[in-house]
């Protein structure tokens, strides 16, 4: 049988390793920020932004030992990706993808090696690129013109999932304490 402290540590580990998954919709030609937050105060020794759905090698963005390496990038991303905050203050390892095109649609993953922890998946983003003629921006079709920005790029399903996890962990913790 697990003690209350072991269960608390297990819950804390689950909560800290919880990755965020978001969906963002943009138009071709837009710049988009792919957000990712590593632990505050940790020394970031490696940052990888990748597209697992690409069939070839290469990163969206690769950073190691205090500098980025463009030659490790997939050719379609060279010259179009930069850190939002080059100093990565407060653990902000977000990148800006410039001049988005239809081929940029897909799943993006942010992995960080910080301090003594292993390389960790922090965030997954599903990027959709849609022309303005789509019904996604048509209010009469049930869409919302600024839907991608309205929730900071989060869709309702992901927000609900996050809320359920937080409530579940909170209730479990309260039950253990009582």
Image (cartoon, helix red, strand yellow):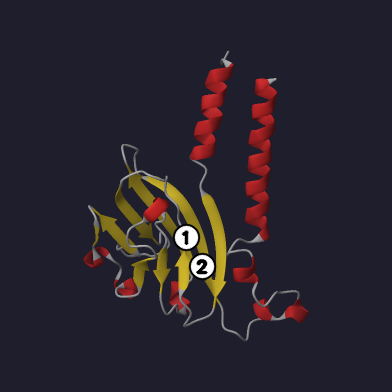
Number of numbered discs overlaid on the protein picture: 2
Q: Which residue is mark 1?
A: 35
Secondary element type, mark 2? strand
Q: Position of residue 177 (x, y in %)?
A: 66, 21
Which of marks 1 and 2 precedes in the sequence?
Answer: 1
Evaluate whether residue 21 shows in this view.
Answer: yes
Secondary element type, mark 1? loop
Residue 34 versus residue 8 in the image, above or below: below
Alpha carbon distance from label 2 to label 1: 12 Å
Q: Position of residue 77 (x, y in %)?
A: 34, 72
Residue name at image x 32 percent, y 58 percent: 87
Quadrant holding the C terminus? top right
Q: Is 116 placed left or right of 5 in the picture?
A: left
Q: Which residue is mark 2?
A: 127
Residue at the limit of the structure toward the top, as seen here: 1
Which of the 4 quarters of the picture holds residue 171?
A: top right
Q: Position of residue 78 (x, y in %)?
A: 29, 73
Residue 163 versus residue 74 in the image, above or below: above
Residue name at image x 44 percent, y 61 percent: 108
Q: Position of residue 113 (x, y in %)?
A: 33, 46
Determine contact: label 2, label 1, CB under 8 Å. no
Residue 88 versus residue 135 in the image, above or below: above
Quadrant holding the N terminus? top right
Q: Is 43 placed left or right of 149 in the picture?
A: left
Tell me the number on the disc at residue 138.
Answer: none
Which of the 4 quarters of the picture holds residue 164?
A: top right
């Amino acid at each position: 049988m697990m003690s209350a402290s072991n269960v608390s540590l297990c819950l804390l580990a689950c909560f800290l390793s919880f990755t965020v998954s978001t969906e963002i919709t943009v138009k071709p030609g837009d710049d988009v920020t792919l957000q990712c937050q590593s632990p505050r105060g940790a020394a970031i020794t490696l940052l990888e932004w990748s597209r697992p759905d690409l069939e070839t090698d290469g990163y969206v963005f690769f950073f190691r030992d205090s500098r980025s390496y463009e030659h490790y990038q997939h050719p379609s991303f060279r010259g179009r990706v930069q850190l939002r905050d080059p100093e990565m203050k407060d653990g902000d390892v977000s990148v800006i993808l410039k001049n988005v095109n239809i081929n940029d649609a897909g799943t993006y993953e942010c992995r960080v090696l910080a301090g003594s922890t292993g390389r960790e998946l922090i965030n997954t983003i599903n990027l959709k690129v849609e022309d303005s003629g789509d019904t996604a921006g048509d209010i009469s079709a049930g869409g919302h013109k600024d839907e991608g920005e309205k929730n900071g790029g989060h869709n309702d399903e992901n927000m609900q999932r996050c809320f359920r996890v937080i409530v579940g962990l909170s209730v479990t913790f309260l039950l253990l304490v009582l």
